Image: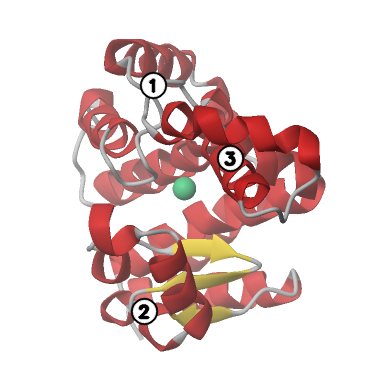
Amino acid sequence: MNRDTRTWDALVALAHKRGVEVREKEKAWQMHALYWLGFMWIWNREFFPRYATAAIHIYVPAAWWRTEDGWKTLAHEIVHIDRNKARPVWTFLRYGSPQLLALLGLLGFLGLAWWPFYFLFALVPFFIAPIIPSTGRIDEELHAYAMSVACDNLVFREHGIVVRESTAIGRVDSLLTAGYFWPAGPWKKRIRDGLIADLDQRAALVSVTTSDIYRTIVQVREQ
Ligand SMILES: [Zn+2]
């Protein structure tokens, strides 16, 4: 068994210990429901082949099964899972805002929400358009991407490559400011600067490398 396969298996086992299953995204009805209800067939048609999703369980595209892309993704998603578990409602609201408010407005319009929320319907375009930055989503992803960066760096070092932090930052930046999560905000420069400051201080990276997720990865890959 090669290193990537072993790392994948170890992270699946780690997820199991947390009561979380790793499932094939394409086969999960929950993911098809999310795709349709989230109107992703309009704005994110690559939802299935290109992105993993953590929603109670972890859904990974079949093509990434037991690969390097796969285990790096699992490491990232387990960070999300842990943060969700620590503060479930709060993390969900932060991650989904401000777009969740649009949903509330829509429910209000249909008479399905408590009346004070009716007026939110008028503001739906503001909540949906990436005008109001989702600081919560940016923050959650920064934590999870610190793990991605740490994993990237680990693999680079295994190949004897000196790590240039900017490579990883470029990748993270394009994901956060592009359409993937629904753009986290309109001010790309601000998001990028925040990201660079965060990773420069290495504070996020240090906290990641002391987690059991990262320790498991290192241990398995040294075997
Ligand atoms: Zn993420």
Name the N-terminal-most of marks 3 and 1.
Answer: 3
Q: Residue 41 location in percent, x, y?
A: 27, 64
Name the N-terminal-most of marks 2 and 1.
Answer: 2
Residue type at mark 2?
Arg
Q: Residue 79 location in percent, x, y?
A: 59, 50
Name the N-terminal-most of marks 2 and 3.
Answer: 2
Q: Are marks 2 and 1 in contact (CB under 8 Å)?
A: no
| Other-residue count near label 1 (Cα within 10 Å), few / some / many at <14 / 14–19 / ≥20 | some
Residue indicated by mark 3 = 95
Residue indicated by mark 1 = 131
Q: Nearer the viewer, residue 137 or 122?
A: 122
Distance of mark 2 from mark 1, alpha carbons? 38 Å
Q: Quadrant of the N terminus?
A: bottom left
Q: Nearer the viewer, mark 2 or mark 3?
A: 3
Q: Quadrant of residue 20?
A: bottom right
Distance of mark 2 from mark 3, alpha carbons? 28 Å
Residue type at mark 3?
Tyr
Q: Nearer the viewer, residue 150 or 31?
A: 31
Residue type at mark 1?
Ile
Mark 3 lies on a secondary structure that is helix
Q: Nearer the viewer, mark 2 or mark 1?
A: 1
Mark 2 lies on a secondary structure that is loop
| Other-residue count near label 2 (Cα within 10 Å), few / some / many at <14 / 14–19 / ≥20 | some
* Numbered label attached to residue 66: 2
Q: Nearer the viewer, mark 3 or mark 1?
A: 1
Left or right: residue 153 versus residue 115 is left
Q: Residue 218 location in percent, x, y?
A: 50, 56
Q: Are marks 3 and 1 in contact (CB under 8 Å)?
A: no
Mark 1 lies on a secondary structure that is loop
| Other-residue count near label 3 (Cα within 10 Å), few / some / many at <14 / 14–19 / ≥20 | many
Left or right: residue 52 versus residue 120 is left
Left or right: residue 5 versus residue 110 is left
